[in-house]
Structures are given as structure tokens and as C-alpha cells.
Amino acid sequence: MNDFSSALSAALTLLLHGDKTLGNIVLLSLRVSLSAVFLATIIGMPLGSATALYRFPGRKALTVLLNALMGLPPVVVGLVVYLMLSRIGPLGVLGLLFTPTAMIIAQSILIIPIIAALSRQIIEDLWREYEEQLRSFGASPGRSMLTLLWDGRFSLLTAVLAGFGRASAEVGAVMIVGGNIDHVTRVMTTAIALEVSKGDLALALGLGIILISLSLAINGAAFVLKDIAERRHA
Amino acid sequence: MTGPGTSHPPRQSDILPLVLDNVSFEGGGKRLIKDLSHSFNAGPRTVILGPNGAGKSLLLRLCHGLLQPSAGDIRWQGELSGDPVPHQAMVFQRPVMLRRTVAENAAYALGLRGIPRSERRDRVAEALKRTGLARLAGSPARVLSFGEQQKLALARAWALRPKVLFLDEPTASLDPAATHTIEEVIGAFHDAGTRIIMTTHDLGQARRIADDVLFMHRGRLLEFSSAKKFFAGPRNDLAQAFLRGDLLWWKRRDIRAK
């Protein structure tokens, strides 16, 4: 029990003092996860909607694959990206290993399947409802896809939030490709892991509380925005 | 007013006639439309009658191009038949409302057809006024009542100014007031020169609207005649039974035996 109260006070102290190191860690966490979500959205959403809309060979297999990849283990993704980016790897010349960019790449790979698979389901359901009407209007497949993405935007936001949740919570991938270097690649989850191994449970728990609060704040803001917009457009 | 070939508003170049030549359609291993041939010429309002499963909705979808026939040929033969898609519209039994406002719903298909924004606005305003939805222009379409949604489906079609309008049981499960408005708008379409081809289960509605009747049963076209002749006494025995209000699930010989 003591751990929890000291964790709370540790968290509060860190926050109230405006700890600069903590600030950097939080900002880097947000930068990495939000960039990864952005990248995964612009790749995953069209991929998912195309899988929903177009009939092509291997479509069912791709659907199963995307669903299965939602459960990708972060450490395995981290390891694969590590091997690609390491000096002797195929992309080693880029010198990206142990940089925030590497972390963004790893997290993007981790959440592309989540956003793609959830988008596919959402777009497919909407297409079932809209198909005859849009074809009757004479909408081309490309135009139909844009219409579905726009009309499904509130549901699709949930897919994006699921991706963000996964990215901000994972530790394995960013640990391996980022290396948890202080002031360079240390994010909240890797900092928590480090404090735990150092034995500073209170600080670790304090960081954990901040991480959860951030996640709550972002999801809450998204919910409110969605609610307001939805009431206007249904 | 009744019968094929009576006087109608003069029309310019058209996509009609629509010719169906020995059309069959298979689904789920069954032949759902069987060797159907018919010509839809410009002019009269055609109502397709028949019991459930007769293939009425399928026939509309085949004509509109939403389905491709398994055998046979469907051709638009008018002057504008090079690209018939922009000249047709369809109103479905269950209106599909885009998750947008009423006005945006009415404007959507106009945007697809490259109609300039200013003209879009005028056409949408006119269509909403015509269907009595003007005061709802800014409301989300999906919170409208079922009757209002069906009116919006008609408004969307109105804004498109189609040469041919297909309607698939447009007033099924609507109350008399909403049905009345819908029938009025269908009449306005007809007066504006739009060719009406519709299905209905409501014999009263068929009498009110039809100039021509197509009677279908189990995928076959059994009778085509003017509404006047049809309602005075169809030639086909199944059509006679249908008009009497008999339920047509039995075989023809059972009717003969009666």
C-alpha cells in the first residue's frame, strides 16, 4: 500500500515541479506515438478500405492476415526492425538505429494491422449499406471509397484510437530499436521499465500514472469531439 | 390518361426505349428471371405487379444496371444511350441515407455528375421544396422519420432530373399521408417528362398511378397491358387470381381446379 501512496506523491511532485527530464520524456513519447499513429493511419486506412471494397485474389487471406497481425508481439517487431536498421542490415546505411525515427517505424509497423483490420470491418459494413445507392448514383469505386471514409469517420476514429492505445502502451519495440537512451530515445514506457529494474518502484508507478492520465485525456478529448461532431452530422 | 401510347408532355432526345431481349437472371443456382422480353418506350407510367418472389425488384435492378443478366440482353436505344447512367435514378424500398445533412444528401449525386456548385444549390433547394423537406435542409438525414427519409430519396432523384426513374415499392410501410406526398411527387416527375417504372404491392396505388401494368409471377412476365384493361379483367388466370386477392403460392392447376 505504501508504494501506491508514495507513487502518487512521486507523480505529483514530478508534475508540480515541472520536472524538465520528465517533460522531455512525455513529449518524446507523444511525438513517437502520434507520428506512428499518423503514419499507420495514412497507410492502414486505405489498405483496410481497399480490402473491404475491391475484389481481388487473396482478399480473404489478406483479411485473415491483417486480423492475425493485430496481435503482433512488440518485441518481435522491434527485433525485425532492429535487424533491418542495424549497421549490417539492409537499411543500415541510413543510420537510424537508436533514434526516435526508428521507434516511429517500429510502432507504425505494430499498429498498421490494427488500423487496417478495424477500418476494413467498418468500411465493409458501411459498404454493405451504401453499395446499391452509390452505384445507382454512378459513383466510381475510388469516389465510393472516399465517401465511405468520410461517412465512416466517427467509427474510424475508434480504429485510430485503438492504434494510439497500442503504440503508447508498448515497451518492447521502442526498447529494442530505441535503446532507452537518456534524453534521446527514452520514452515513458521504457523509463518505467528502467525505474522498475533500478528498484525505484514509486517513481515507476508515478510515471505509470502520468501515462495512463495522458491516455485518458487524449481518449476523452477524442470522445467529446466525436460526440459534438456526431450530434451535428449523425 | 390510361393505356400505352396516350399523350404525354413532349420530350427532347431521350435514352429510351429500354429493350430487354430474352433476359434471364440466376442467383444461388436458381433462375429468378426467366426469358423476359419487353420494351419500355417513352411516355406511360409502368407499374410492375406480382406476388413476393415474382422478380419485380430484380427486374428493376437489371434495368437500372445494378445487376447484370445471366443471359439475354438489356439495351438503351435512345439518342442519349451512349452513357445511360447519368439519366436514370432509383428509389429503393429502404432509403439509404448518407451520414450527412438533408441538403448534402440531395447534393451528393449532383457533385458526382460535375454540376457546378451554384446550380447544385438551386437544384437542391427546388428538390427539397418540392418534397416538403425545405425546413429540414440542415438536419442530419439519419434522424428523419422513415417517411421523411423516403421523401429525401425522392428529392435526391428530383435534383438529378432523370429521364427514367425506377421506384421499388417506394411507399411500403408508409402511412397514408406520407404515401400521398410520395405519389404526388411521382406525379410531378411524370408531368416533368420523367419515365416512371415502379413496383408496388398496393393495388390501390397501382390503380392511382399506372398507365401500363406488367404482371410477373415466379420470374416470368405473364401479362402486359394498359392499366384500364388490366384492372377491368386481366387475360392471365394468375393475374386474375392476384387481383381477386387470392394468395398465389399454389400451382396454376389448383387455380384451374377451383
Image (cartoon, rainbow, N blue to C red):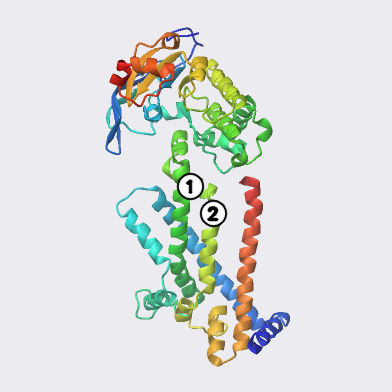
Residue B144 marker: none
| SS at badge 1 | helix
The residue drawn where x is 38% and y is 23% is B81
> In the image, are marks 2 and 1 on the same chain?
yes
Amino acid type at mark 1 = Leu
Q: Determine which residue is flagged by label 2.
A: A155
Residue behind mark 1: A126
Mark 1 surroundings: few (<14), some (14-19) or many (≥20) residues within 10 A? some
Which chain letter goes with mark 2? A
Query: Along the line of sight, which residue is nearer the eye, A111 or B25?
Result: B25
Cα separation, mark 2 vs mark 1, equals 10 Å
Q: Is any part of residue A46 visible from this angle?
A: no
What amino acid does circle 2 point to? Answer: Ser
Depth check, front residue: A179 or A224: A224
Q: Position of residue A191 (x, y in %)?
A: 56, 83
Can residue A223 be seen? yes
Above or below B99: residue B69: above
